[in-house]
Every structure is written in structure tokens, then in C-alpha cells.
Amino acid sequence: MAHLASGIRAGAIGAVGLLVCGVLTSCGGNGDGESEAGKSSSSASGGAGGTTAVRTAYAKTAEEETARMTLRTETSAAGKSAVAEGKGVIDLEDGDSAMAIKAGGQKVEQRVVDQVVYQKLPAKQRAQVPGDKPWIKIDLKKAAAEQNSGSSNQINDPAQSASFGKGITDRNTEKVGTAKVDGVKTTRYRVTVDIDKLSDSAALKRQVGPTVPMDVWLDDQGRIRRQQVTMNIKPTDRADKSAVPEKMTVRTLIEFSDFGTEVDADAPPAGQTTDVTGKLPGQRS
């Protein structure tokens, strides 16, 4: 589970945060690509069996080593919303990835190598970065240390939803039904995540409350094909630059397909990159 979470973190954080006002969250419309069976709820409880299936799914997915990944993010606040979508390949173990991301009418090429994000920005945004180089660089480990596990750090990170598996209990685990995800038959489970069971849970709990609902679609081999989390975020201390300034809804959708696909992600030449770690909106300097 930890390996999958760190892989998603490295593979997905970065460009979406730049293009969506520093708030990296995701969604997928309810029912997108689902069969009618997936849209209708079943009253049958998943119980301990369902809980075990969802918990073990993280390890089973990571064992596949690589996959194609799609990421859709949506943030809604004050009557406005921002959407970003990413598509590419990811190493589920170490997070090396290559993705194309679209948001706000802009396109960004992104690579992640050894926990460092590289983004090739559009010309308009490139002019706003000192050095006038085609790529920017964000060191995720350094950024995490500088932000001291701030509350927005957890919300802005799609890997946080991957680690939610640690908070699943037998209570409120429900088998919803079946659905097709990218042509693959899956079983959909709805679970309640206990925030107190997560690491660094205090800040997240202040903003989302004691529990968060999560839906997971598993294939017949017990692997994750889709995961969706919806969080209603409450604002915290406005004096904290990394805090969420107002109430917002965050929806997260991550999908995996083509397990075992080749992942070819190389860092761009150092002379073509500008290190912006800690210098972006929402980051501490």
C-alpha cells in the first residue's frame, strides 16, 4: 500500500497544482463509463470480506509494477470550478512517470524521475519563470520537508487518497454492484475512511472531519481500476499561506489500465531546467 501511494504521489503531483491555483485535487463524474449495474446501489454489505478486498487491492495493484494512469481533478469553491486532466504511464513502485496534463486551456508535458517533477511549460507561463528555460524542476522530498506536512499538503496530493486504505474498517464497507471501467468488469465497493487511522491525520481531520467516503472499483484479480474520493474542505487559519482559504469541494478520480506497460521517463538536461522548489504559490519558501 505504501509503495502504491508513494508512486501515485510522485507520478501525479506537480503540473496540476501549478495550473489549478495550487490546489491539486481530482474527480471523475459519477457514472462516467459505468454500466447501469454500477450506477445502482446494492443493499448488501461488503463486511469483513469487502474490507479485506479493498485493503489488499493496493498491494496487488503495486505488484503489477507499471500501468497507464489517467487523473482527473476538479476543485469547486465560491461558485467556480477548475478542472485538470492527466494521461500517461507510471511506475507504481517508485513513481517515475511521463504524463501530458491539460488545465485552463493549457498543456504541460511532465516527467517524474527519482521523486523530482519536471514540467515543460507553455510559452506564456515560461515567461513568468526566472531563467527562461523550457523546464521547471520541483524536488518533492525537499518540498515536503519544507512544508512540514501542512494541511493543504495532504489535500493537494492525490497520493493521500491512495493511502486512505489504511483507514478502512469493517464498519460501513458496502459492495455497491458491478460496472465496466475501460471495458473491464469490476466490483465497486463504497467504504468509510477513518481519518484518525492515517498518518499525520490531525490537520486533515480539521478540514474534512472524522471520516471521508471513498469508492473503489476492483477487477477480478483484485486490482484497482478506479478510485474516487470526494472531500468537503473547511477553511482553516487564513494567516497560513498554505491553508485552504475558503470552503471547497474536492473530487479525486484515478484510473489504471494496461498493467505492465513500458515506462520511459528521463530527466531533461540540467541546463534546460530551473529549480522552483518552494517558490510556487502554495509552497513555503
Image (tube, rainbow, N blue to C red):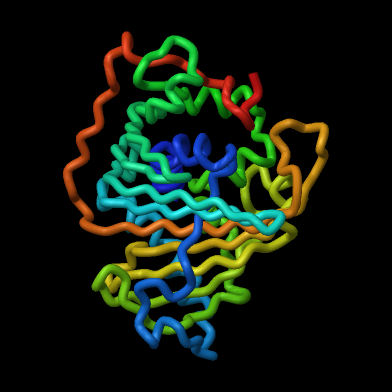
- The answer to whether residue 272 shows anywhere in this view is yes
Q: Residue furthest front?
A: 124
For the point 47% across and 45% down, which residue is it? Answer: 104
Residue 229, given in percent of the width and then of the height, sits at 54, 61
State the residue lying farthest toward the bottom. Answer: 43
x 44%, y 55%: residue: 72
**What residue do we see at 45% from left, 19% from top?**
127
Does residue 181 appear left or right of residue 127 in this picture? left
On the image, which quarter does residue 101 sit in? top left
Q: Is residue 50 left or right of residue 70?
A: right
Relative to 148, say whether 131 is above or below. Answer: above
Classify residue 143 as left or right of residue 203: left
- Taking 217 as reference, is 17 left or right? right
Q: Position of residue 251 (x, y in %)?
A: 55, 59
Tell me, yes or no, if residue 196 can be seen here.
no
- Residue 35, placed above or below residue 70: below
Q: Is residue 176 or residue 109 the one in the foreground? A: 109
Nearer to the camera, 273 or 11: 273
Classify residue 81 by image quadrant: bottom right
- Quadrant in the picture for the C terminus: top right
Q: Which quadrant of the view contains residue 182? A: bottom left
Whether residue 210 is situated above or below residue 160 in the rendered picture: below
Residue at 46% across / 35% down in the picture?
14
Query: What x and y, as percent, mark residue 271?
Result: 32, 9
Residue 230's x, y, as percent?
A: 59, 62
278 versus 191 height, above or below: above
